[in-house]
Image: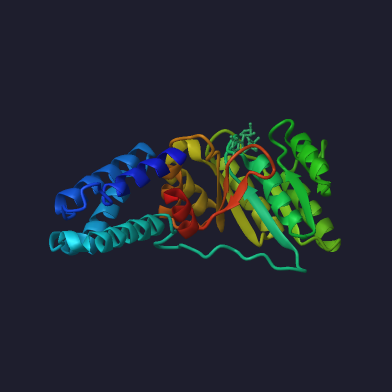
Amino acid sequence: LAELGGKLRSSLHRLQGGRGDDAITTETLDAVLRDIGEALAESDVRAELVTDLKDNIRRKVGDAVSENTASSNANLARQVQRAVVDELTSMLTPSGEGSAKPYVMRRGRPNVILFVGLQGAGKTTSIAKFAHHYLRRGWKTAMVCADTFRAGAFDQLKQNATKLRVPFYGSYTEADPVSIAEEGVDRFVQDGYEVIIVDTSGRHRQEEGLFEEMQEISAAVNPSNTIFVMDATQGQAVYDQARAFHSAVNVGSVIVTKLDGHARGGGAISAVAATGSPIVFLGSGERFEDLEAFNAQSFVSKLLG
Ligand code: GDP
């Protein structure tokens, strides 16, 4: 995303211009919007979102630009910049039907957090990062492995849990993920854990069986929040995936992974926001620390540096 940020910054730079005597004109604004649109398209943001964004900016500042004189350049540049920031922020803010506020964790109570997502999306890694995040803030945290589908899933979770020193629950012999989930959650609720994370099977693609299993586990553990983990490298293609998961289970939050070093991150984040699912964290690497809380406003300020 550093590349996208650089391009957006340099397009806004056109407004500062070297030739102070020339007024910012409609042509300048067109060039700025064209550059911004190209930068967003390169980051794989959906064409409709880009068009809306450009139209909204033009609606907000178009009149001021056409009436501008050189003496108000500085003022106008600020106005355009603000419009760009606001529109980028609203593009990345979940809106529309069914858009929910992210779940707020409650201290001193069991928060059962169900993780879902396709295999390879980064679910197990994100669970470890999520646990690390809450552990560091003093929450009593535990993990349950209800993925009996992928060989090695329990070992991977166990390894992370051991490194983080959090208790874990799982089984090498029990084949029913629903009963593992139920038993593990019951145990940690009884023991007074505050953040009880449940890992589920990802499989290779969206399929009936996967959704059925997720729904059964969800019914058994009655999660406080269900977090959907998705891979940013797929760009805007995640839109359909997010919608499918959203309608299969009651997705309350989204974690977008692999934002480090991939050009399609803007596409993924804006696509998720368009589905109305609140993004809560971004994954930006393979270490436990590589998880950033997501807030559209501060994300955009950081992007435009
Ligand atoms: P799962 O099948 O969804 O549980 O996926 P894993 O957690 O096993 O992750 C799949 C691969 O993606 C692993 O090689 C992870 O190290 C890697 N991965 C996960 N999250 C990130 C991330 O934010 N950035 C990068 N670069 N790699 C990640």
Q: Between 258 and 201, which is closer to the camera in this rendering?
A: 258
Which residue does the image show at 32% across and 57% down from the upper left?
81
Ligand 1 positioned in quadrant: top right
Coloring basis for residues: rainbow
Tell me: 105 left or right of 18. right
Most distant residue in the top direction:
151
Tell me: 51 left or right of 272. left
Percent position (x, y) of residue 23?
16, 55
Percent position (x, y) of residue 20?
21, 52
Which residue does the image show at 64% across and 49% down from the upper left?
115
Q: Between 64 and 247, which is closer to the camera in this rendering?
A: 64
Q: Vertical placement of 62 versus 32: above or below?
A: below
Tell me: 123 left or right of 267. right
Asked whether the viewer can see residue 251, the reply is no
Q: Vertical placement of 44 versus 141: above or below?
A: above
Percent position (x, y) of residue 98?
45, 63
Most distant residue in the left direction:
67
Which residue does the image show at 54% across and 43% down from the upper left?
230
Most distant residue in the right direction:
191
Percent position (x, y) of residue 47?
29, 44
Asked whether the viewer can see residue 276, the reply is yes
Residue 219 image-quadrant placement: bottom right
Which residue does the image show at 73% across and 49% down from the upper left?
132
Tell me: 20 left or right of 240. left
Q: Between 57 and 16, which is closer to the camera in this rendering?
A: 16
Q: Between 254 and 171, which is closer to the camera in this rendering?
A: 254
Q: How many marks?
A: 0
